[in-house]
Image (cartoon, helix red, strand yellow):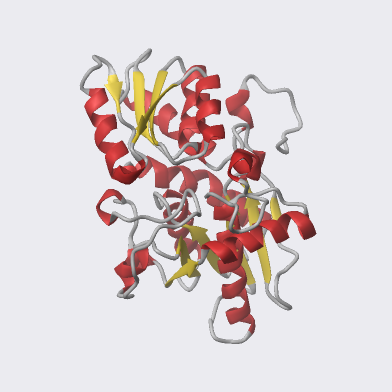
Amino acid sequence: MTTHRRPLENVLDTVGETPLMRVQASPDGVDVYAKLESFNPGASVKDRIGTYMLEQMLERGEVAEGGTIIEPTAGNTGIGFALAAKQLGLDAVFVVPERFSVEKQTLMRALDADVVNTPTEAGMGGAVNRAHELAEEFDDAVVPQQFANPLNVEAHYELTAPEIYDALDGEVGAVVAGCGTAGTLMGLTEYALEQDSDTYITAVEPEGSFYARTKGADVDESEYKIEGIGTHDLTTNQLFHPELVDTIEQVSDRDAHDELKRLAREEGHLVASSAGAASVAAQRVARRIADGDIDAPHDTVVTVFPDSSERYLSKGIYGSYEEWEG
């Protein structure tokens, strides 16, 4: 599915080099480009950190050969880690809040990982705590901790960002990315600001999430249907550096849902709610650049479509907004 043109040794060689595609709904004069991460072997952006983090941790001796990784995850990270773990000779256990996609949990088990569920109401904080409790029960287990491990950011700084800049000959005016662990956003941001300190940076989260509070916004807490981005507990998201971000764009569930359906219907992109939110926010930023409200170094906006809608079909993602479970 990727752009490789030679025979490869194993599935990990197919991670990365995903397409960068122009969003056809871009406003006149300012193009929005999306990195299509469903083209990775595990069909999400998290394949990148699964491979990069485990390879680096093995090289540094942070996980023993033949050891076990235990990770709290909403699902895609588990799939990415599971893909890499098996190829690298590691066992994998994932702690997943109950509300998250059944498809993701099924795929983790298919990749020979164990899945432990925690109560939805305990959130990702509860999953993090349970992962560390489980690690105490093993002699050779480690929690990579995507929410706090700098290797998460480094993976995107070293791999994802250079791919984008190579494709656009360095002409990137704004970076707009969903903020869950903040690894993708921060990796792209650090690279972008090194290329041009005037690059405009926007974090994307659902309405009801808390990241906007780090920039002084008085936002209310509420539940949201969008998966994979946002937080209700800023203490678990140690990778996010608000001082590097110009704006935090909140997107409603309804707007994200409308956009993911539009992307499928009009542009042929089978993407999920986090991509819908990213597309909405990227187009908002592009329109502000076009209107002269944002002074970006180039008339281009880049974003990331993290995964595929196929992972959420059981939740009625293409049904009416009211039917979508999120």
Q: Could you tell me residue 132's position as x and y percent?
A: 24, 30
**Residue, x 59% and y 32% (percent of image)?**
42
Which quarter of the rendering shows the N terminus? top right
- Residue toward you, 40 or 121: 121
- Residue toward you, 61 or 121: 121
Q: Could you tell me residue 282's position as x and y percent?
A: 59, 67
**Could you tell me if residue 128 is visible in this image?**
yes
In the orientation shown, which residue stands out farthest toward the bottom? 292
Q: Is residue 182 above or below residue 144?
A: below
Count of number-bearing discs: 0
The image quarter containing residue 209 is: bottom left
Q: Is residue 94 above or below residue 39?
A: above
- Residue toward you, 39 or 165: 39
Q: Is residue 81 above or below residue 323?
A: above
**Could you tell me if residue 169 is visible in this image?**
no
Q: Is residue 283 left or right of residue 238?
A: right
**Residue, x 29% and y 54% (percent of image)?**
233
Q: Could you tell me residue 114's position as x and y percent?
A: 42, 20
**Residue, x 50% and y 70% (percent of image)?**
199
Q: Is residue 303 left or right of residue 214?
A: right
Q: Could you tell me residue 229's position as x and y percent?
A: 45, 53
**Residue, x 36% and y 24% (percent of image)?**
69
